[in-house]
Image (tube, rainbow, N blue to C red):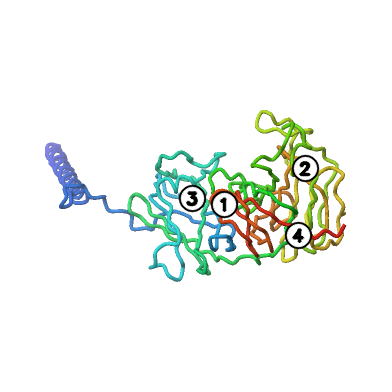
Amino acid sequence: MKKRSVDVATSTKLLVKAGIAVALLASTVCQMACASDTTGKPTLPNRSPFPPQIQLQVPYAPTAFPAEDGEHLLYELYITNFEDAPITLDHVDVIDSNQADRPPLATFAGHSLNEIVRKAGTDDIMDISNVAKPVNINAGSTVVLFLSVTQPPKTSMPKQVVQRLALTNGDVVQGAPVGTQNTRLKVLAPPVEGTHWIADDGPSNASDNHHRRGIFIVDGRMTDSRRFAVDWKQVEQGMPYHGDVHADRSYYAYDKPVFAVASATVVYVRDGLPDNPPGHNRDFHPALPVTFDNTGGNTIVLDLGDGQFAHYYHLKAGSIQVKNGQSVQVGEVIAHIGASGDAREPHLHFEVTTEVPLLAGEGIPYVIDHFQVIGGAGHTLGPRKNETPLDGMLVDFGKGRSRN
């Protein structure tokens, strides 16, 4: 029994010594891993030998479109953090897949990165102040980046681009290569006629553009049908109305004719919803409670072919001159502008998407065969041919090609 006691004591001493040795070894490893460099600053510990568990996805491939200052891309990048700890974005590059060693086509960092971020589960983008803030992505979280790339005139958009993320811990994640010619770019006639039409919330990457940020989930699928939508409003001296601000007929756009943008087939018609009295924010008192079903108001959808559909929303009740299944000719009057559905004032909401149902398709670009830019901050004045009107452009479409 005494011998056994001695053995136990000896074993205990050995275990204590072994524990001290392990602790010393761990301390040495930590000192080596966290040693200071020649500047005296501590270096980062060795990172995981595995690639960062960050998923990059472009749910819908973009199509480059021409506008006044070159070729443009507008699309979304979804980033999901599958790590067990938060990550922080330093900057994001969009690069030519075939020339990755060349300077990026676009870089987003600091405030410009803040402006394009939206976190899943929030209504608004991450930050729209002038102060740059860290873009953190929590473990298991997803953020959306609203990306925009512009190539200068006479410079073609690369056929494929890829996204490169630089994290503040030094990691770089590159992926989600995507083509830039996903759909056929339709050449359309103007949807309205005359002058002083402003492309309100037209194509742009502005942080306050409600069309560009119009992500919506329908039938379990996330889409942005309004990506290239325009609210066409008619103005005089910068104002959309003259007289009583709460009367539809005070608005220059009200009851103006709407035209078929192409020879096409009518695939959806809705009529009978009343116009709203104009009003914004707390002054908005719709004629009927706004629901998902009636938000577009009186509507016409034209099948343009190639899986593309032109949507006309907020039309005047009783003004629709076509029916489902009817063929229409380009320039034909099909309805008049109203303020039905979710319209706060008379205007034409026009968009081209990949589906017939409201908000269910992906918004895709198109060009208009002719128009004249006559105003709009930051825009070059002059004629345009086969280009896309951009946000804030003041446009003269000339006389429509009416057949009735």
Q: Position of residue 231 (x, y in %)?
A: 68, 47
Disc ID at residue 80? 3
The residue depicted at 80 percent of the width and 44 percent of the height is 255
Quadrant position of the C terminus in the picture: bottom right
Q: Which is nearer the N-term, disc 2 or disc 1?
A: 1
Amino acid type at circle 4 is Val
Q: Secondary structure beneath disc 3?
A: strand
Q: Are marks 2 and 1 in contact (CB under 8 Å)?
A: no
Disc ID at residue 254? 2
Q: Residue furthest bottom?
A: 98
Task: Please tell me how crowded label 3 is: few (under 14), some (14-19), or many (20+) other residues with Cα within 10 Å.
Answer: many
Amino acid type at circle 1 is Ser
Residue mark closest to the camera, 3 vs 2: 2
**What distance separates the C-alpha of mark 2 from that of mark 4?**
19 Å
Task: Please tell me how crowded label 2 is: few (under 14), some (14-19), or many (20+) other residues with Cα within 10 Å.
Answer: many
Q: Which residue is mark 4?
A: 261
Amino acid type at circle 2 is Tyr
Q: Which is nearer the N-term, disc 3 or disc 4?
A: 3
Q: Which residue is mark 1?
A: 204
Q: Secondary structure beneath disc 2?
A: loop
